Amino acid sequence: MRIITDERCAGYSQAGHPEHPARITETVALLKSQTELALNFAEPGQITDAQILRAHAPEVLARLQIPQDFDADTPFFKDIAVFARASAAAAVDAMNVARAGESVFSLMRPPGHHATRERSMGFCYLNNIAIAALDAVATGSKRVAIFDFDVHHGNGTEAILLNQPGVAFFSIHQHPAYPGTGTTQAGRNCFNYPVPACSPRNIYRATLSRALADLKEFAPDLVAVSAGFDGYMGDPLAEGTLLAEDYHWLGASLRTMNVPFFSLLEGGYSRDLPDLIFNYLKGVEGK
């Protein structure tokens, strides 16, 4: 399995902000110390403006250079454009690795699924998964499914991909919760599966299963996974009820679809995040 990561993505932070560098550094430390999985670590390459602009208006790239916070949750940082582009580049790299037949996980920050075509928001600056999905369609993939199991609705991904040919979006998320969207199907290709706060774990799992079954019906030739681990019962930013073994099950469920897929880190803010990711990767690898 390929792990795409770069220690430089830990190079920005704000005191008290839940999206902090240790999410990456502690996960890398765990993955490098474990002996159950054979992992190859690689740094992301470069991404072009043209690839980014399939998903974003030019103003989004320009705004990354303006030293003002984007919203109360999304601060401006020096070189945030560099960090955001590296995370998006890792997403495109992961997509290409998956299409070449290798399992892969992009362990980068910032996350991306709240960023819309016109706006950075919700800890997210560029929409990594949408950029990668649209790049896949532009370079030969015919049917790309996006599976988003972050506890927060991927509003940006939905807004960018709405009614786009060749893609379908499936999001399982808590509602009500930030950002308040994702209550019903949107357009022809965006399917939402809201889960009430504190839902019994078996209900949450059943909703995930229903979304996976619908995704299979779409018959994708590539699956892009927004892997958020904040549906975990110990996460401080939501009221999910999933356990580590549920993330293992998710990874295994995606593996048994026998369709190339790649996963990008989105949310997940508990101290247990490294172990949750490790469990997911073990499921992906059939361990």
Image: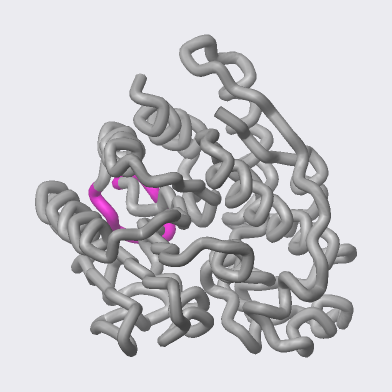
Q: Quadrant of residue 19?
A: bottom right
Colour setting: one colour
Q: Residue at x 53, y 73 (%)?
A: 114
Left-right relation of 63 to 2: right
| Residue 257 horizontal/vertical position (percent) | 29, 43
Region of the chain picked out in magenta, as a range: 233-241
Q: Quadrant of residue 40?
A: top right
Left-right relation of 113 to 9: left
Is 171 magenta? The answer is no
Q: Quadrant of the C terminus?
A: top left
| Residue 90 horizontal/vertical position (percent) | 69, 50
Q: Taken as a whole, is the magenta stretch helix, strand or loop?
A: loop
Q: Quadrant of residue 148?
A: bottom left
Q: Residue at x 46, y 66 (%)?
A: 142
Left-right relation of 273 to 78: left
Tag count in the figure? 0
Q: Quadrant of the N terminus?
A: top right
| Residue 61 horizontal/vertical position (percent) | 79, 79
Q: Residue at x 62, y 64 (%)?
A: 139
